């Protein structure tokens, strides 16, 4: 898939997720970070991986977001 199109889909997907997060639930699972800040950070890491070609075989942004949610090792700069 075209990198620019994939990035746009991933941005939309993370924006949707961030806006639907309950602020209270989010604070129970993270440390004093807003959902927007958390997903912006994650988005920048995913975009970096898209640019490197990590997700070239993926068919949609939703597929990328799901893969990263289930396994952070997709991101080379995450442990």
Image (cartoon, helix red, strand yellow):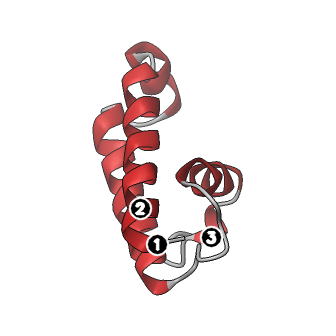
Observer-nearest of 12 and 48 = 12
> Image height check: is 26 above or below 41?
above
- Distance between the alpha carbons at the discs numbered 3 and 1: 19 Å
Q: Mark 1 — residue?
A: 2
Q: Could you say where residue 4 lies in the image, as x and y percent from the top left?
A: 36, 67
Report helix, strand or loop for mark 1: loop
Report helix, strand or loop for mark 2: helix
For the residues bearing labels 3 and 1, Cβ distance under 8 angstroms? no
Report helix, strand or loop for mark 3: helix
Quadrant showing the N terminus: bottom right
Which mark sits nearer the N-terminus, 3 or 1? 1
Residue 71 found in image quarter: bottom right
Q: Mark 3 — residue?
A: 74
- Distance between the alpha carbons at the discs numbered 1 and 2: 5 Å
- Residue 55's disc is none
For the residues bearing labels 1 and 2, Cβ distance under 8 angstroms? yes
Q: Mark 2 — residue?
A: 5
Q: Could you say where residue 25 lies in the image, as x and y percent from the top left?
A: 50, 18
């Amino acid at each position: 898939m075209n990198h620019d199109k994939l990035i746009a889909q991933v941005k939309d997907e993370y924006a949707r997720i961030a806006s639907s997060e309950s602020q209270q639930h989010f604070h129970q699972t993270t440390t004093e970070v807003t959902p927007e800040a958390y997903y912006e950070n994650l988005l920048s890491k995913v975009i970096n991986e898209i640019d490197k070609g990590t997700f070239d075989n993926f068919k949609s942004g939703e597929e990328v977001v799901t893969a990263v949610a289930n396994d952070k090792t997709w991101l080379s700069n995450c442990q």
